[in-house]
Image (cartoon, rainbow, N blue to C red):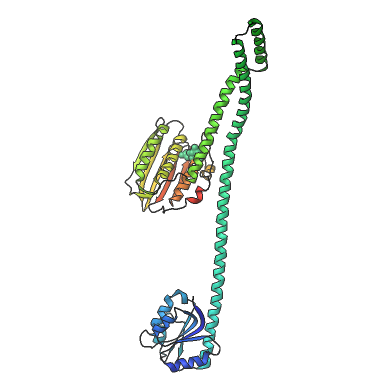
Amino acid sequence: MYKDIDILAVDDDPTNLDIIQEIFSDDYSLETADCGEATLEILGRIRPSVILLDIMMPGIDGYEVCREIRKNPNHNLAKVILVSGKAIPEERLLGYQAGADDYVCKPFYADEFLEKVKVHLKLVDAEKKLFTLNEQLQAQVDAQREKLMQSEKMASLGQLAAGVAHEINNPTGFIMSNLRTLADYVDVLCKAVKLADDISAPIEDNIGHISEVIDKIQELKKSQDINYIIDDASELTHESIDGTQRIKEIVQGLKSFARVDEAEIQEADINEGIEQTLKMVWNEVKYHCEVKKELNPLPKMRCYPRQLNQVVMNLVVNAAHAIPEKGTITIKSELVDSNIVIQISDTGKGIKEENISKLFDPFFTTKPVGQGTGLGLSISYGIVQKHSGDIDVKSKVGEGTTFIITLPLDGVKENEGNNEQAAIC
Ligand SMILES: Nc1ncnc2c1ncn2[C@@H]1O[C@H](COP(=O)(O)OP(=O)(O)OP(=O)(O)O)[C@@H](O)[C@H]1O
Ligand SMILES: [Mg+2]
């Protein structure tokens, strides 16, 4: 902790220090030092607003002390006034070059000296106020920025939550309605099974009993369309299974989004990852797509390889889905400056201009209900961002699409940005 004082006077001649004390000590707090070394030592404890600095001293001279003061951020507001017997312009120039603010010649004219120091003290005072104001303003700006970031985060979380609610609400709705209908069907079918049981039960008056049961069966058949119930029950069951499958996919997508099953950072060969991923999606592409690979040699890169594989997988599957009949998917990798650039192109149907800006929004999909969750690209975007990279898209309707991923080699930092997204799920 520094003690703030008004003036530090430095001179190897005690008479000069006495005169300075006489001029200033009545009105200002003042300390003295008799050499350069002592000055630097004392400046470790006190913070003077003005330093009156003799130039010619044994040991470290005034210029050197001045340079040291200027290097020290704790004294960046202090005004240094060089005090010297020599008034030649070269000497003054040296002083200003060393960082001095002003110059006073010995012997000094006390009143003028006092006024000069007063001006500098006022200046320091004003600068201190400005500095404090600036710090307060900066703190306010930082607080506002933090607030804004927080609210943006909350807004995107809210958007995500609303999307999840909407997407899950739909299948949940029809699954519930199906289950209610199925419950009624089960009642009817139970009754039918019971009647069938009754017919086969060994009862004495068999004829009377059978005709009674047959009447009941006729009644049941009249009131319920058993054949329809059997067909519809099967359809409702399959529809409900599809619905639960959709919910499962959404939850799985969200888990990836939150990166719950995060793997370790590794030094990985991106080309190897592309090859592995292609094997995984081969079934999806092999019938209607020709896959061209232009994989150029790449240095290993620190990354989350499983996540990058997931990005490639999403993009290749999207490309395959965009090709209605026959087409080509080209996967290119190369090193450009210190970035790994992966391009995945297809000769598919392309993307409409108005959809380009929505592609990376969670749940944006043009696929029919049940075929796409619309999470693939938003998950990919998050993963690429986590690697400090960029993902860009170029597309022409009817001609095809290219996604370009740029990954800086040193993009991923240890322990980076995991926790906050993990909180989503
Ligand atoms: N290569 C492409 N060509 C044409 N359209 C594309 C391409 N890639 C993505 N799209 C469009 O972007 C939309 C969003 O893609 P995204 O991968 O996020 O979701 P999805 O494929 O619809 O569903 P899923 O969650 O199963 O991946 C797609 O529905 C499609 O309209
Ligand atoms: Mg997709």
302 and 311: which is toward the camera: 302
Can residue 351 be seen here? The reply is no
The spot of residue 360 in percent (x, y) is: 51, 45
* Observer-nearest of 366 and 371: 371
Q: Viewer-proximal residue, 330 or 217? A: 217
Q: Residue furthest left?
A: 297
Q: How many marks?
A: 0
215 vs 129, nearest the viewer: 215
Q: Residue at x 52, y 48 (%)?
A: 423
Residue 286 seen by the camera = yes
- Quarter-wise, where is residue 127 in the image? bottom right
Residue drawn at 57 percent across, 60 percent down: 144
**In the image, is residue 317 above or below residue 125?**
above
Q: Residue 140's x, y, as percent?
A: 57, 64
- Residue 313 against residue 412 in the figure, above or below: above
Q: Residue at x 55, y 59 (%)?
A: 145
Image position, residue 425 (x, y; %) = 52, 44
Figure check: 383 above or below 139: above
> Residue 13 appears at what percent x and percent y?
41, 92
Residue 178 image-quadrant placement:
top right
